[in-house]
Amino acid sequence: MNIEKTKAQMKKGVLEMVILSIITKKEAYASDIISQLKEAKLLVVEGTLYPLLTRLKNEGLLEYRWEESKSGPPRKYYTITELGKNTFKQLLEGWTEMSKSIQTLIKK
């Protein structure tokens, strides 16, 4: 069994929920999201994050606005939509239920 591959798949499975969680708290720039993920030991590269943000935006879960930057090109700040908030709530409920089930099985 390739443990690293399995761990990567587990992380991939919860990444959408985690990103929605970050943006639920306040609007965020992609670098802010990557920093928060890194602090939580969930290392994600831009090549993974940007397509995911685009997909979440296309699904109506996120919106963005452009803001001029003093130190480079304009920045895209993401905010969560009502649909995104509802989706996050459902994902969190599913995660909580699944976590409890897994803990029950592990403790047996």
Image: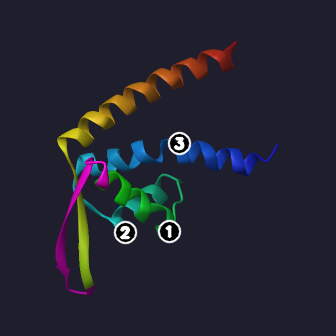
- Residue on which the image places disc 1: 47
In the image, taking residue 98 as reference, residue 16 lies left or right, namely: left
Q: What secondary structure is marked by label 1? A: helix
- Residue on which the image places disc 2: 31
Which range of residues does the magenta coloring cover? 58-72
Q: Quadrant of residue 17?
A: top left
Of 36 and 56, nearer the camera is: 56
Estimate the x, y position of residue 28 in percent, counting from the top left.
27, 60
Name the residue at 25% across, 75% down. Answer: 75
Name the residue at 34% across, 29% down. Answer: 90
Q: Quadrant of residue 70?
A: bottom left
> Is 61 covered by the magenta stretch?
yes
In the image, taking residue 74 as reference, residue 30 lies left or right, namely: right
Q: What secondary structure is marked by label 3? A: helix
Name the residue at 79% across, 47% down. Answer: 2
Name the residue at 30% across, 31% down. Answer: 89
- Residue on which the image places disc 3: 13
Instruction: Assess whether mark 1 and mark 3 are in contact (beta carbons under 8 angstroms).
Output: no
Residue kind at label 2, given as amino acid type: Ser
Q: In which quarter of the image is the C terminus?
A: top right
